[in-house]
Amino acid sequence: MLNREKTDAARLLAADDHRYIWHPFTQMQDYLQEEPLIIESGDGCTLKDIRGNEYLDGVSSLWTNVHGHRKAAIDIAIKAQLERIAHSTLLGLSNVPAINCAKKLVEIAPEGLTKVFYSDSGSTAVEVALKMAFQYQQQSRAGSPKRQQFITFANAYHGDTIGAVSLGGIDLFHATYRPLLFTSLQAPSPYCYRCTLGKTYPGCELACLKHLAAMMETHCGRVAALVIEPLVQGAAGMIVHPPGFLKGVRKLCDEHKIIMIADEVAVGFGRTGRMFACEHEGVRPDIMALAKGITGGYLPLAATLTTEDIYQGFMGHYEEFKTFFHGHTYTGNPLACAAAIANMEIFATEDTVNKSAAKIARLQERLQAMLLLRHVGDVRQRGFMVGIELVADREKKTDFPPTEKVGHRVILAARRRGLIIRPLGNVIVLMPPLSISEIEIDRLCDITCAAIEEVTEAG
Ligand code: PMP
């Protein structure tokens, strides 16, 4: 295509984007004022737009991409599956990739998680977990029908469907829907930078855990399950939990016979430096929700893994109706499962998790420079998950007012320098693919630093 034709085509696409698409989590009034960035292709950690500009993918295409874009082994696996069949239902039937993928998931999951229930997004993986735990308590001999409540954490995020929103603890996203939601019991978030209990780690001796213990005592025998984002509360701004917190939660769940649901949607598949975040503290959840990185960032697929015990709670004669009456149309989609198998094979053949240690260390080293900036209040990192919290006043930890749109302006400044990132309010998130090179890590940090400086230190 000639340059002129290319420019005309780009202009047309931009106009049609504005005309037809309602973008998620986006104030469209603002979006319509900006030139849309339209991605056409990608390779490795690089994204290319329709005008030929290249960008580093600094948030793994919304926390999903693992081994880079156009990873040959995943491309080939999907194409090979496409030659056989694109979709067939899992309701009462099975398919080859769904079986092989489930087997692989069980092999790599924390021990004791032996059954795989598929769905297609992080939200649905959590909905499945919720309903599974609730129904188990209602009908299993080992459960108790009085156990109908859920414990969650302040600042939690588990997805956008109504059940998942009921577990949420971020007012900005969840408060509007309160009248539609079931109530859950909210434990304090281990957000050390802004501890709501007014304590400081490690002197606090994990006072937030003691609150949780008291809550469990008070509601003894009425709690079905606890839901937690292990190690990092992602959507709240990469809130990294102090060591020992997760293990303490597991212990309390055991003591009170509460089902522990680990939402590993964001932290799973190598993000934290281990295959699953629970591994860092030797924790085995009773139910584990997976999505995002499961297909290497290629196709929508999710899985809710559980134990033999919970699975057995659904056995019974047909007419007892202990069946788990849940299933989405594209559940166990063969193309997505083929991508997931290839993704897990790459983890094994390329030793992805072990090789990431040096990159994580490099990222940590390069993040130190951020702390020198006047408006950086906190830099949090766990593996490849980074949150840089920007504050108007470092001493008082005061927020920038929303009217200043500081987070948004920083990501636009980064974009002009060739980096795509996305803020969570005034927290700048970095979450590159695990395949990022050390040179790219340097670029990621240099650009982010320059963008923060440009926006927060101007004038
Ligand atoms: N759980 C967690 C911890 C998440 O971070 C997310 C998405 N950011 C979800 C659930 C929801 O996943 P999805 O957007 O795929 O529905």
Image (tube, rainbow, N blue to C red):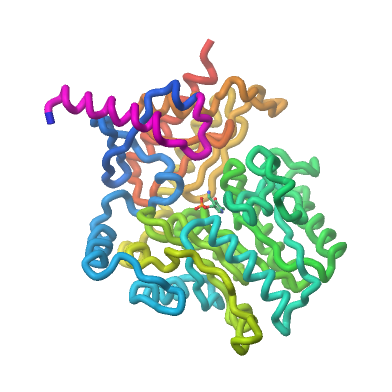
One can see residue 449 in this view? no
Extreme-right residue of the structure: 218
Image point 51% across, 71% down: which residue? 117
Quarter assignment of residue 293:
bottom left
Q: Magenta stretch?
A: 2-29
**Residue 420 among magenta residues:** no
Q: Is residue 41 left or right of residue 389?
A: left
Q: Is residue 117 left or right of residue 48?
A: right
Residue in front for this viewpoint, 341 or 80: 80
Residue in front for this viewpoint, 313 or 341: 313
Q: Is residue 132 above or below residue 457?
A: below
Q: Is residue 97 left or right of residue 365?
A: left
Extreme-top residue of the structure: 459
Quarter assignment of residue 138:
bottom right
Residue 355 spot, x, y in % from top left: 37, 57
Image quarter hosting the N terminus: top left
Image point 32% across, 37% down: which residue? 39
Residue in front for this viewpoint, 322 or 241: 322
Extreme-front residue of the structure: 319
Residue in front for this viewpoint, 182 or 353: 182
Image point 54% across, 75% down: which residue? 113
Q: Is residue 51 left or right of residue 432?
A: left
**Residue 18 among magenta residues:** yes
Q: Is residue 292 above or below residue 57?
A: below
One can see residue 22 in this view? yes
Residue 154 spot, x, y in % from top left: 71, 48
